Amino acid sequence: MRQVRPVLVNGVEALVMARMVLEDPGCVDTIIQDWQSVLPATLNMWKVEQKDLQIFFEDFRNNLLHNKEDEWVKRHVMYPGLQETLKACKYPWYIVTSRAKHRTLKLVDAMLDMQWPEDTPRLYCKLLPPNQRKIETLQEILDKPMVKEQNATIHFVDDRYETVKAVAGEPSLSKVQVYMADWGYSTQAEKDAAKETKGVRVISLTQFQELLNWGILMGVDDGCGDDD
């Protein structure tokens, strides 16, 4: 599943991917290369409606969250060092995600020991389709008085290449610093493409923590080294 995860957009697609890979492990390349065509064709072959599968998937996840919360939380593990870094970060930071709000808030509470209210301005959820909705969200954040009045720099980090490419190519977001996370769910080909994409930097987990700590990449933005 980790091999095909980079092209997943909606969580329910994981069910389709899992069955396909279990039935034919050799289908990984097909999924990676043409998932947007493979998905509807596969559902049609199985005579399954995606909306019905979505309802089943949501019910299953919500049931697990409500009845086996500890088990559900344990299935989510933060990358090393991020818990401490996020909790200590002195800069305002936001979560922009395709995940549902109630599940995201539960993870923020369980993994960061932060109790955010339902209407927190720091959380943007259910952002599907991801490219357009995240562009709209960044435009909204840029328009916040706190950002505009202080001429603050916005750093956007994502592990989905198509999304960082779309954000970097959006003229209204020219002031946003865009980063591709090299530790997330992306293929080597996507990382290589990101390195060649104007306006996108590929960063490591350590560099992401530097951004949270200092607001810059040490050895790059501090004038002590060259940007590679």
Image (cartoon, rainbow, N blue to C red):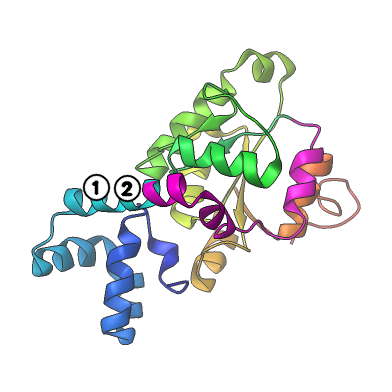
Between 32 and 122, the residue placed more toward the observer is 122
**First to last magenta residue range:** 63-91
Identify the residue position indicated by label 1 in the image.
Answer: 55
The image quarter in which residue 182 lies: bottom right
- Residue in the image at 32% along x and 47% along y: 58
Amino acid type of disc 2?
Glu
Q: Is residue 89 magenta?
A: yes
- Residue in the image at 76% along x and 55% along y: 207
- Residue 110, placed above or below residue 12: above
- Residue 51, placed above or below residue 143: below
Q: Is residue 61 visible from the viewing direction of this image? A: yes
Between 49 and 115, the residue placed more toward the observer is 115
Quarter that holds the N terminus: bottom left
Quarter that holds the C terminus: bottom right
For residue 49, side relative to residue 186 (left or right) = left
Identify the residue position indicated by label 2 in the image.
Answer: 58
| Label 2 with label 1: CB-CB less than 8 Å | yes
